[in-house]
Amino acid sequence: MATYNLTIPLSEADVRALHVGDTVMLTGVMVTGRDAAHKYMVETFIRTDAVPESEQSLYEELKALLKGSMVYHCGPVVRQLEGGRWAFVAAGPTTSIREEPYEAEVIEHFGLRGVIGKGGMGPNTLRACQTHGAAYFHAVGGAASLIANAVKEVVAVYKKEAFGVPEAFWVIRVENFPVVVTMDSHGQSIHSEVEAASKDVLARLVGTG
Amino acid sequence: MDNLRDSFVELVRRASTNLSGDVEAALKAARDRESPGSAAAGAFEAILENVTLARAQSTPVCQDTGTLIFYVHYPMGAHVRALQAQLEEAVAEATARSYLRPNAVDSATGKNSGNNLGGGMPVFHFTEWESDVLRIDLLLKGGGCENVSTQYKLPDTALKAGRDLDGVRKVVLDAVYQAQGKGCAPGVLGVAIGGDRGTGYVFAKEQLFRPLGDTNPDPELAALEERLLRECNELGIGPMGFGGRTTVFGVKIGAYHRLPACYFVSVAYMCWAHRRARLEIRGDEAIFSQEGD
Ligand code: SF4
């Protein structure tokens, strides 16, 4: 287990060097996205023959932003500052498993190097991480103020009117955002390891083993 | 006791932004038990830094400010309906001041009320007592950990859990195993033995008001609490499910009578953001306190 300071965009080598249990401080630009955003990306950009004209410019923006970067599963509490800019007030991670039906395709299509959230994800995402050189980064659930303080700037926001504040694509610049690798690009997942180990202990303690 | 609204807003602010001393001390002790540089140690560092920031900025410890559960002990002759109205006003005001996230969603329409008031929200328990002090205890119960709270009916064949305290022990261990890190571990367990399905859950949550360092007056339950604390931590799930030495940092058990036909064990799982605060009104004085201050 090691600690890394990494700057986004990440290279494939950056990600391949990481293993489950490593702590990483992330700096750079990433994009928030949860349920509505994932459904939209997959239906509008990926499982389609042609991206509609009206969505073309956002598609280009997202392609540029996400290459080598990450999607953060987060529905922030935001505040509008004087002059119209936005700031994050609370920005803890939300449960990631809801995006399991979409994430593998998003990783592949946009060339993500990571996904950030809480609770871990399933076998499809794990396989996509292995094939395409990405990792699942676990943020600390409930650490809303700490993470909001790591968000130094809200660079842009897309789909705020259509999806609402928590579901919008918030483009944020973070500095030293603390996360732990819980699924790596080598097929390892802390979530399944811890579950299996605790299952054995449970069997011993209750006498069903 | 005419206008207590401002004191009630302050009670909510404290509960949401200032983690009580006993919880913070337990989290620090947990950090010190993990090996430096491990993922678990890092998680505790982040949690503790977050707690300090929230207190300094007067911002919520966690963005999910949960269900507000009030226990009100009032002197004879108090005007309970007026008290409830003032508490509700205070909750709406605390939401407007961002101490609380708007968290009350109409189950039929999906519409958020915007002020944390709605059917069954917040939760009130009013009890008259001998004292002439008005005492209000508040607990904020998050949604993620509510989702992993659970109830068992003994006997449970799969877990070989019979209708006795050893059976209780087995199902509580199973509850913690099933929760893994999903309730934002490490957690505190409020456990109720007996009651019916409704009272069991309410009584389980009531256990969460107990100071972490207290001792159960019933020696058998006290022994079970101690054993469960140790055994839950043997599961090794750790903070956020990263693996580690602290999975649970408190086990509090209460027992109700039950029907001969029923034996329920209700487990209220509380996340690390175990937020509670107390207000006492003595004459004209408003006294705020939190465990371990
Ligand atoms: S379970 Fe607790 S710490 Fe986790 S998000 Fe919910 S309220 Fe916050």
Image (cartoon, coloured by chain):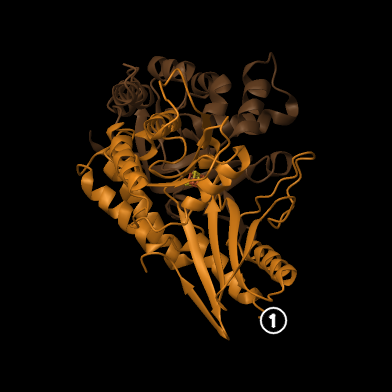
Identify by letter the chain in brown: A
Badge 1 element: loop
Residue B175 image point, x, y percent? 44, 32
- The quadrant the N terminus of chain A occupies is top left
Q: Residues within 10 Å of mark 1 (few under 14, many from 20)?
A: few
Circle 1 marks a residue in which chain? B
Q: Residue at x 31, y 50 (%)?
A: B45
Kind of residue sitting beneath label 1? Asp
Residue B110 image point, x, y percent? 75, 40
Position of residue A83 relative to residue B1, above or below, is above
Q: Kindly tell me whether residue A118 is visible in this rendering.
A: yes
Q: Quadrant of residue A106?
A: top right
Q: Label 1, on which residue?
A: B2
Along the line of sight, the residue nearer the viewer: B60 or B116: B116
Residue reaching furthest to the right: B109
Residue reaching furthest to the left: B35
Side (left or right) of A82 relative to B191: right
- The quadrant the C terminus of chain A occupies is top left
Position of residue B250 relative to residue A125, above or below, is below
Residue B199 image point, x, y percent? 60, 44
